[in-house]
Amino acid sequence: LEDQHGTVEVVVFSLAYAAVHELLVEDDAVIIQGQVKKDENSVKILADTVVPIEKAEETLTASIHFNLNKNKTGKDLLLKLNDILKRYPGSCYAYIHLFTPEETDTIIALPDTMRLKAGSSLTRAVNDLIGYNAVETVCDSEYKGQKENNKKGRFRHA
């Protein structure tokens, strides 16, 4: 595996390799989850999961957050948002953050019956309705320990 900072050896065992070998193409971007093994002379990653970069958001997202300006959010907008969300059932938890600039947020956790499927279609539909970039996705909990307080695991969508 190589990026602009260096290279690292990645070991993909036979069971995992059978499922992901078509993703392991030179110059194709992937995300690898696994265990880091380090000795005196080298570092290796023992891969558990390989995800193509274009499927990362859909595959790794645990929750979706909709940031709505309280002053610009009325009943009609919420009903239209509800109609959009119903078209994207999935496994991600969803939250509505009602904010007023310079004040605190009110966070509403949507019920389990409204879990959503992350992806660009949902993001585009919501952002088009709201009129600004309102959608954030948060990675699976395996990544959360690295970024709990610094939001590095959040993706803001344009």
Image (cartoon, helix red, strand yellow):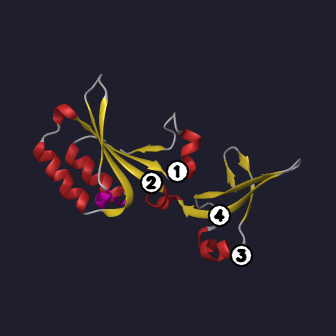
Mark 3 or mark 1: whose residue is earlier in sequence: 3
Measure how far apart labels 4 and 3 are at the Cα level.
11 Å
Question: Upstream in the sequence, badge 4 or badge 1?
Answer: 4
Q: Which comes sooner in the sequence, label 1 or label 2?
A: 2
Residue under the point 30% across and 56% down: 122
Q: SS at mark 4?
A: strand
Whether label 3 touches label 2, CB < 8 Å: no
Per the image, label 3 sits on a secondary structure element best described as: helix
User: In the rendered image, which quarter contains the N terminus?
Assistant: bottom right
| Residue 41 position in % (x across, y down) | 88, 49
Counting from the top left corner in percent of width and height, residue 27 is at: 62, 60
Q: Residue at x 72, y 71 (%)?
A: 13
| Residues at discs 4 and 1 in contact (Cβ within 8 Å) | no
Classify mark 2: residues with Cα within 10 Å, few (<14), some (14-19) or many (20+). Answer: many
Magenta highlight range: 112-117
Residue 19 is drawn in which quadrant? bottom right
Q: Name the secondary structure under disc 2.
A: strand
What SS does tag 1 mark? helix
Q: Which residue is mark 2?
A: 62
Query: Callout 3: few (<14), some (14-19), or many (20+) C-alpha neighbours within 10 Å?
Result: few
Mark 4 or mark 2: name the one nearer the start of the chain. 4
Are the residues flagged by discs 1 and 2 in contact, CB closer than 8 Å?
yes
Q: Kindly report the distance in space between the C-alpha atoms of the residues bearing marks 3 and 2.
A: 28 Å
Q: Which residue is mark 3?
A: 14
Residue indicated by mark 4: 48
Q: Residues within 10 Å of mark 4 (few under 14, many from 20)?
A: some
Q: Nearer the viewer, mark 3 or mark 2?
A: 2
**Nearest the camera: 132 or 104?**
104
Marker disc for residue 141:
1
